[in-house]
C-alpha cells in the first residue's frame, strides 16, 4: 500500500510503501511530548521529496535516532536510525499521513523511559 504524508506547511513531503499493521506509542521524554504514533520500516520503503528547506535533526540520550522536523512549522514527520542488525530504518509519525484513519491501526505501547 502507498501512503503520502507531509509536515503542516508542506515543505516536507514523503511517500511510504508498506503494510501498516501496527504503530508504536513510546513514553520516552521526546515521544511523549510529541505525541507521535510511530511506524518503523526499512528506509528503502520511504521516499522524502526534496524539501524546500533542509530538515532539522535532533538527537538525544544514546543518539541512536535522528528525529527530523521541518524548520518552518516544527512538525516531526520522520526519524531515522538503524535496527539491531545495523539496517537503516525510517520511522514515520502516522499523524503526518494524509487521509489516514489513525483508529484503524492497533497501537503497541513501548516503555521508552525504562529502555
Image (cartoon, rainbow, N blue to C red):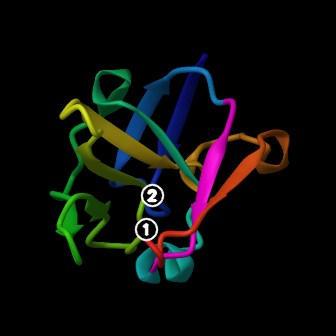
6 relative position to 25: left or right: left
Q: Which residue is mark 2?
A: 7
Q: Residue at x 44, y 30 (%)?
A: 15
Quadrant of the rendered image containing residue 3: top right
80 relative position to 15: left or right: left
Label 2 – label 1 distance at C-alpha? 5 Å
What is the residue that sits farthest to the top in this orientation?
Answer: 1
Q: Position of residue 103 (x, y in %)?
A: 84, 49
Disc number placed over residue 75 in the picture, else none: 1
Q: Residue at x 41, y 64 (%)?
A: 76
112 relative position to 109: left or right: left
Q: Nearer the viewer, residue 52 or 32?
A: 32
Image quadrant containing the C terminus: bottom left
Secondary structure under tag 1 reads: loop
What is the residue that sits farthest to the front in this orientation?
Answer: 114
Q: Which residues are magenta?
A: 21-28
Q: Mark 2–mark 1 contact, CB under 8 Å?
A: yes
Q: Position of residue 87 (x, y in %)?
A: 22, 30
Secondary structure under tag 2 reads: loop
Q: Earlier in the sequence, mark 2 or mark 1?
A: 2
The crowd level at tag 2 (other Cα within 10 Å; few <14, some 14-19, many 20+) is many
The crowd level at tag 1 (other Cα within 10 Å; few <14, some 14-19, many 20+) is some
Amino acid at each position: 500500500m502507498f501512503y503520502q504524508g507531509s509536515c503542516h506547511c508542506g515543505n516536507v513531503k514523503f511517500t511510504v510503501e508498506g503494510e501498516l499493521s501496527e504503530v508504536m506509542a513510546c513514553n520516552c521524554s521526546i515521544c511523549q511530548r510529541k505525541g507521535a504514533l510511530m511506524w518503523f520500516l526499512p528506509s528503502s520503503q520511504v521516499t522524502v521529496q526534496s524539501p524546500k528547506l533542509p530538515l532539522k535533526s535532533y538527537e538525544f540520550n544514546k543518539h541512536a535516532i535522528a528525529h527530523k522536523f521541518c524548520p518552518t512549522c516544527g512538525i516531526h514527520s520522520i526519524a531515522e536510525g538503524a535496527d539491531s542488525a545495523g539496517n537503516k530504518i525510517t520511522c514515520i509519525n502516522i499523524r503526518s499521513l494524509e487521509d489516514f484513519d489513525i483508529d484503524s491501526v492497533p497501537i503497541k505501547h513501548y516503555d521508552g523511559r525504562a529502555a
